[in-house]
Image (cartoon, rainbow, N blue to C red):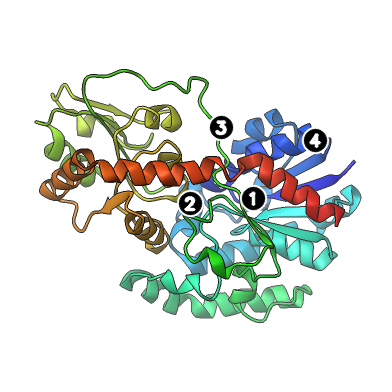
Amino acid sequence: MNKIVFFNIPAHGHTNPTIPVVKALVKSGCEVTYFSFEMFREKIESAGAFFVGCDVFLPQANQDELDKKAGKDFSALIKMVTDTTINMENEVLNQINAISPDCIVSDSVCFWGKLFARKLNILYISSTTTFAFNMYSAKMMKPGIKEIFRMFLGMPRISHSIRRLNKLGYEINSFVDIIQNDNNTNTIVYTSKLFQPMSDTFSDRFAFVGPSLFEPLNNCRKKKSRKLIYISLGTVLNQNDKFYQQCIEALKDSNFDVIMSVGEKTDLKQLETLQENFKIQGRVNQIEVLKDTDCFLTHSGMNSVSESLYWGVPMVLFPQHSEQGIVASQTEKLGAGIRLKRSDPNDIRDAVNQIINQQTYRENAEKIGKSFRTAGGSDAACNFILSKIIT
C-alpha cells in the first residue's frame, strides 16, 4: 500500500482542489495522511484520509490575519512559514518518520511541506492552485506600488527568516529557493495548458490536470426568462461595501437578475435594497450558481475563474492584487472576460452589457472550459502522483 502525506495552509482556495485528489488516491488503495487545520477536518476525513491537526503550530494570529498574509504580504507570509516550520520541527518530523510515506504532496504556498520533504529526502510533489511560475511566466507578475513597497520593507524580515531556517539544517540560499518550482520539480497544476500562460516553457514534470472540482449533483441548466449576473469577491478579501453599492447602482434598473455573495462577515443590513432583481447573501453554493450564470463579476481568484470557465461563463474581472491580476489578464487575453479599469457604476454596467451582448465571450469561455474538462482533473492528478511513486 502506497503511503502519501499531504500538507496545506489554512485557506479554502488551496485546500479544496486537493480533496477530490485525496478521494481518488484513497479509492486507488493508498493510505493518505493530511496535515491541515481543524476547519478542514470534516472535508479531509470524508475523503478517506487521516487528519492531523496543525492549528497548535500556527503563530498566534486570527484567521483573517493569516488569510491576508497568504494573499498580499509576502514577507509576513515567509515569517509565518518560518514560525510554523520551527514549531512543527520535532513533533511533525517524528510523525512523518513513523508514517514513512512514499511521497509528500504539499501546496506550493505551504512551504513547510517542501522543506520537510527536502530534509527527510522524501519524494516531493507540489500542488499548485495558481498558475505555474518559472523564469518566463514570472515576468507576468506586475505587483502594484503598495506591494513593491511592502516587499522592500519586508526584505530584512525575509532574510532573518532564512537564517533561522538555515540554523535548523534547511539548505536555503534565498526566498526564491523556498517559493520556486523549477523544471525538475514534480508539480500538479490545477489548470489546462490552454489557460496556463507560456505553457510550452514547462517540462513534462508539470501535470496540467485542469480544475479539481466537485461537480453539482444536477448538471442541467435551469430554463429562465432573464439573464443572471453573479457577483462575488471570494472568501478572503470580500468586505467591500463600497463596491457592492456600486454594483447595486449599476444594475438596479437592468433587465437582469442578480445574485450577490458578499461574505459572511459583511453586514447585510448595510446593503439592503428595494430592487426586486437583487438577491444578496452572505454565502452561496458557487458552483451551483455558476451553472446558470450568464456573466460573473469576480475578484479574479484562480478557483473562482476556473469554476466559471469550467461552466463556460464569461466574466467581468476585478482583481484585488497582482496574482489575481495575472489571472484576469490571461482571461481577457483569451477573450473570455473584460477587466474593469474602474469600479464605478457606469464601468460595471458597460462591461456587463458587453459580456451579455457579445456571444464571442461565451464561446471563448466554453472553449477554455472544454480544455479543463478534458485535462483529467482529480483522476489525472492521482495518476500523476502514483506514476512518480512507481518510478
Q: Which residue is mark 2?
A: 67
Q: Is residue 280 left or right of residue 70?
A: left
SS assignment at label 1: loop
Snapshot quadrant of residue 112: bottom right
Q: The C terminus lies in which quarter of the figure?
A: bottom right
Q: Which residue is mark 3?
A: 214
Residue occupying image coordinates x 59% and y 59%: 109
Q: Earlier in the sequence, mark 3 or mark 1?
A: 1
Image coordinates of residue 184 in percent, x first then y, are 71, 70
Label 1 sits on residue: 8
How many residues crowd around disc 2 within 10 Å: few (fewer than 14), some, or many (20 or more)? Answer: some
For disc 3, the neighbor class at 10 Å (few under 14, some 14 to 19, many from 20) is few
Please report the residue visible at 42 percent of the width from the left and 50 percent of the height from the top: 301
Q: Label 3 sits on what residue type?
A: Phe
- Examine the image and state in which quarter residue 122 appears: bottom right
Question: Which residue is at 21% across, 34% downward?
Answer: 270
SS of the residue under disc 2: helix
Q: Is 240 situated left or right of 40 in this image?
A: left
Query: In the image, is 18 to the left or to the right of 217?
Result: right
Question: Closer to the camera: disc 2 or disc 3?
Answer: 3
In 3D space, how far apart are the residues under numbered discs 2 and 3 (Cα atoms)? Answer: 23 Å
